[in-house]
Image (tube, rainbow, N blue to C red):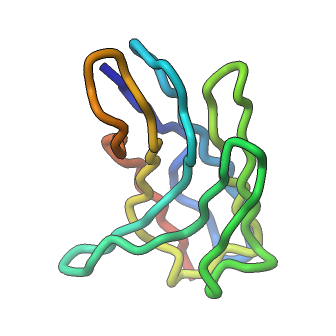
Amino acid sequence: QVQLVESGGGLVQAGGSLRLSCAASGSIISIYNMGWYRQAPGKQRELVATITSGGSTNYADSVKGRFAISRDNAWKMVYLQMNSLKPEDTDVYYCYADALAPGAIRRDYWGQGTRVTVSS
C-alpha cells in the first residue's frame, strides 16, 4: 500500500547539520499529515516535527529553532533539516505519513528508521 523510505542519517559532530529525507510510494489516494518521530533504545517514540498538507508545522520544544520540517506534495516527500545538533539528538528517526490508500482506512504509515548519531 504505502511505503516510506528514509535517508540522510549518519554520524555528525555536535553543532553540525544533517538533512533527513523521506519518500512515500505505492498506491496512495491522499497524504494528510507527515512528520518525524525519534526513538532511543528503551524509550518511547517521541514527536520531533509534523507538517500538514497545507504546510502548518509543529515542533517538539527540544528542537524548536534548530530543526525545520518541509514537504513536497507533488513528489510525496518530507524533509527534516537539523541544525546545531546536540548529542542528545542521537536517536533513530522515523518518518510517518497519515495517508489514505485504496481499499484501506486512513491511517499512519511508518518508515524503517534512519539512525542519527551526534558525537560530542
91 or 76: nearer the viewer: 76
Residue shown at 50%/84% (left/top)?
A: 88
Residue at the left extreme?
42
39 or 49: nearer the viewer: 49
The percent coordinates of residue 30 (x first, y second) are 53, 26
The percent coordinates of residue 83 (x first, y second) are 76, 67
Residue shown at 71%/55% (left/top)?
A: 69
Residue 88 vertical placement versus 70 (above, below): below
Residue 44 vertical placement versus 95 (above, below): below
Residue shown at 78%/49% (left/top)?
A: 55
Q: Is residue 102 left or right of residue 31?
A: left
Residue shown at 63%/31% (left/top)?
A: 77
The percent coordinates of residue 90 (x first, y second) are 46, 72
120 or 113: nearer the viewer: 113
The percent coordinates of residue 5 (x first, y second) are 43, 31
Q: What is the quadrant of the C terminus in the image?
A: bottom right
Residue 96 vertical placement versus 39 (above, below): above
Q: What is the quadrant of the N terminus in the image?
A: top left
Q: Is residue 26 left or right of residue 116?
A: left
Q: Residue 51 appears in which quarter of the rendering?
A: bottom right
Total labels drawn: 0
